[in-house]
Image (spheres, rainbow, N blue to C red):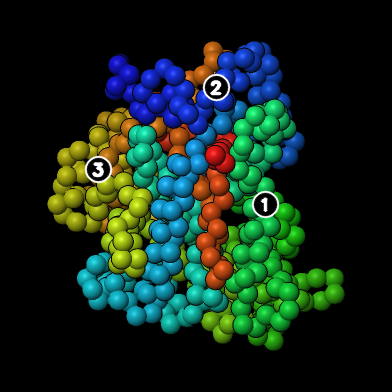
Amino acid sequence: MSKDNLPFDEMFGTGDEPREPYKSYHKWFEGEQNARLRRKAEEAEQAFRRTGITFNVYGREEANERLIPFDIVPHVLSNREWKKLSEGIEQRVRALNAFLHDIYHRQEILKAGRIPAHMISNNEAYLPKMIGVEPPGSIYTHIVGTDIVRTGEDEFFVLEDNARTPSGVSYMLENRETMFEMFPELFIQNRVCPVSTYPKRLRRSLAACAPPACDGKPVIAVLTPGIHNSAYFEHAFLADEMGAELVEGHDLRVVNGRVAMRTTQGYTPVDVLYRRVDDAFLDPLNFNPESMLGVPGILDVYRAGGITIANAPGTGISDDKAIYSYMPDIVEFYTGEKAKLPNVPTWRCSEPDSLAYVLDNLSELVVKEVHGSGGYGMLVGPAASRKEIADFRAKLEAKPDGYIAQPTLALSTVPIFTNKGLAPRHVDLRPFVLVSPNGIDITPGGLTRVALKKGSLVVNSSQGGGTKDTWVLES
């Protein structure tokens, strides 16, 4: 295959010389011995094991707790590239918050016909009990993870908006710390924007969203489903780094109109709850009555202004993959501007013409569940067997409104370190965004996920992907 037919290589571009953002790193790499780099890679893996950075894989019979592989070659972005990304992400997040406020209040975008009303009313992520509720500071999406993919020098696309309970920020922080410990000289030679202040910024951002009932310094807690959750390490990590309490549903109860947590001195009111529990399990009195993970009555306290829940209940509809397909309209409707970061072209299988096209081209498309996540429930047509395609065809025909389809993009590659040297692998990037009444704060970097299998386009850790440190250069 000629160089012209290969995906865009972020280190080398279309030539043999490294691109400007990678020149300093590449020069350093060329001067290193493979044996030392292999030893450092092994040390990094041992460091992750000692720290206990694992995740759970659901639906597997074998041992389900795994270490996410870490690659020692950083993903490097220039300051110019980061400026382009951060401006587009900020515009998008502002539009998402405006959209959420609108669909739970005046519903102007529906009246204008920019989104079909049934896309909202029939969506399981839409919570009618949030209609008319004004979140503290009018903030719905306090923490957002925006998945970015790249196909060329200046060709960036938003792949997904993660606005329910976005995960992965702990890996961003641990990747940087591990990289710094392994190769401190690199951070002397390269002016890399820091990410270590994220927990402090998270706490400050959450505190700025305190509810009307808050009296004094806001009390912040992280609500986790418990140790069996796939992201429990992150829940505990962030609570510890923020200096916040890590609580489970049974640690909380409604006392005198406030949500309070159990302490050695009795029950103390919580002002801001950073919840990592899905909407359905948040309040057994208002949602799933069988939930043991949430707090009975918390939604009533929230509606009365007694607590801030981050992210707000009902935000899940904004990262629904069917709603994603309308994001260019959503951005334009609320900002008056064209989207600075485009969507990946998307076919809504709920529409007969789109469904017909998708069924005719399954072997060339990526098909995803509207409510899916983590790389589960998706079909990567070019990599699928005839049986997998046939099985997915049956699913599509049975429930077309449960799926969207996208073209198989030639995702950019970044080299990973192998025993034989550098080898290109596909990547995506998840920058993390904090939103408060004080503004939008985007951490310079994010979580780079890499497909470790040659040719694979699936970067999710649950599907065999790994992670990298992400560098944004200061100049």
How far apart in space, not on screen, are marks 2 and 1 (Cα)?
28 Å
Q: Quadrant of the C terminus?
A: top right
**What residue is rendered at 80% in x and 70% in y?**
263
Name the spot of residue 176 as percent of width and height, x first. Answer: 65, 39
Where does label 1 land, which residue? 197
Whether 129 is drawn above or below 294: the answer is: below
Q: Is residue 355 above or below residue 332?
A: above
Q: Nearer the viewer, mark 1 or mark 3?
A: 1
Residue located 40% across and 70% down the image:
98
Which one is earlier in the sequence, the residue at label 2 or at label 1? 2
Residue 270: quarter of image: bottom right
The reply to whether residue 65 is in sight is no
Disc number placed over residue 26 in the picture, else none: 2
Mark number displayed over residue 213: none
Q: Earlier in the sequence, mark 3 or mark 2?
A: 2
**Disc 3 to disc 2, C-alpha distance:** 45 Å
Q: Residue at x 47, y 23 (%)?
A: 18
